[in-house]
Image: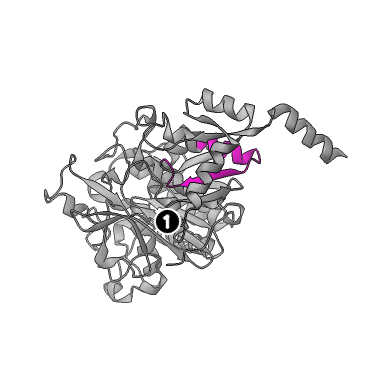
Amino acid sequence: MKKYCCLLLLLFLTKFSWSTKLLVPMDDSQSNHLKAYGLSFWALEKGVVIEWLLNYKGGSFLFPHLVNLEEELIIRGIKYQVLTDGQVNQIKNQIADPEVNMELIQLEKAPKIAVYSPPGTQPWDDAVTMVLKYAEIPYDQIYDSAIVMGVLPKYDWLHLHHEDFTGQYGKFYASFRNAPWYREQQALAERDAKMLGFDKVSKMKLAVALNLKNFVIGGGYLFTMCSGTDSFDIALAAENTDICESMYDGDPADQKAQNKLDFTQTFAFKDFILERDPMVYEYSNIDGTDLHRMGVVTEETDVFTLFDFSAKWDVVPTMLTQCHTDEVKGFMGQTTDFKKDYIKNNVLILGENKALGTAKYIHGEFGQGTWTFYAGHDPEDYEHRVGDPHTDLNLHSNSPGYRLILNNILFPAAKKKKRKT
């Protein structure tokens, strides 16, 4: 009886219209692409099932016509259309045509989201945290101690903040070893390592990386950008050796560390060569930042292209590449993109820089879960530097580069079909 009364109350409050639907187009006509993802997440949290129309008008969303949902669309400045059942059926028939590269996916449940990020202020921003806040998507902030103590099973989706999992403090030593923020972060990391029973920060970071790996094996969704991509894989490969010089952990690195790397433990990368010099702001030869410095591309010509997948057969990569453009502005970072020679054969490249022959956006499965690596630091700040002001997403509400991040946010909510190719 109580359940029945609650259902009646829900119907009364929402004033459900059975004859119409709300279409949120995601092509160039959309007034705020980023807020549209936040509204979708909000609806999922309320128990509303959404239909994601892959490749239809840029990957549009179809909602039941609820008055409070429509009010939110207006408040958040999101363009939408009210469609009759006849119009909806026409769209669904078009999508169902086997000759058309479109698909309809149901989004059923909002994923529980965490962001791995240190407490306190930092001299740089984080694209994922910024877009989550702008889109009004809730998340928990967790860090090393929480992960080592086993909090990850609470979450479905995890983003790794701009981070160094090798224990080398981002290789900022050459430029920032005397900066107050660098010394503060080093002191906090050493304190946490000691509290958790590790004699080195590098061992604590390895324990974190292994917990993250197990999170994915167990069915979790991992997303990371910039140095959180290659430094994570490097830490996994270096599990049985010491790659940190004395300024990082008090003793010299293993001189035979390169030969002791185990590439079978990594998610994405193979056969890479470590950058051993602590005065060089680089981890290995995976990163393609050096290619950008050679003048082949400029800020104006630097773009990466999204692959066009078969929506009916390759549903997962199609979800991850939904956008209102096939070409996205490039952007740099400590890890700007990935040299293809060091990417494993089973890794799916979602976006590539054709001019440089590098990959920008890659994805794969590991165990029961998935991971996505997106190179670069800030999709709307070409060469973001330490201390630069934060990006104002009010000025970039239709950013294709930020859309790709939010595709990953909704991906775990989907009732997915397994990729067949």
Q: Amino acid at mark 1?
A: Glu
Determine the residue positioned at 19% across, 41% down: 299
Q: Residue 172, relative to residue 230: is it above or below?
A: above
Give the camera-side residue of 161 and 317: 317
Task: Say which quarter of the image contains residue 165.
Answer: bottom left
Residue 361 lies in magenta, yes or no?
Answer: no
Q: Residue 176, relative to residue 147: is it above or below?
A: above
Q: Residue 238, relative to residue 196: is it above or below?
A: below
Q: Residues within 10 Å of mark 1 (few under 14, many from 20)?
A: few
Give the camera-side residue of 28 and 154: 28
Number of marks: 1
> Residue 249, position in %: x, y?
36, 59
How was the colour assigned to the protein in this rendering? Answer: one colour
Bounds of the magenta span? Answer: 38-57
Quarter of the picture holding the C terminus? bottom left
Residue 51 lies in magenta, yes or no?
Answer: yes
The residue positioned farthest toward the right in the image shown: 1
> Residue 329, position in %: x, y?
27, 42
Task: Say which quarter of the image contains residue 372.
Answer: bottom left
Determine the residue positioned at 21% across, 52% down: 289
Relative to 13, 408 lies left or right: left
Give the camera-side residue of 53 and 253: 53
Determine the residue positioned at 41% across, 32% down: 30
Residue at label 1? 99
Mark 1 secondary-structure assignment: loop
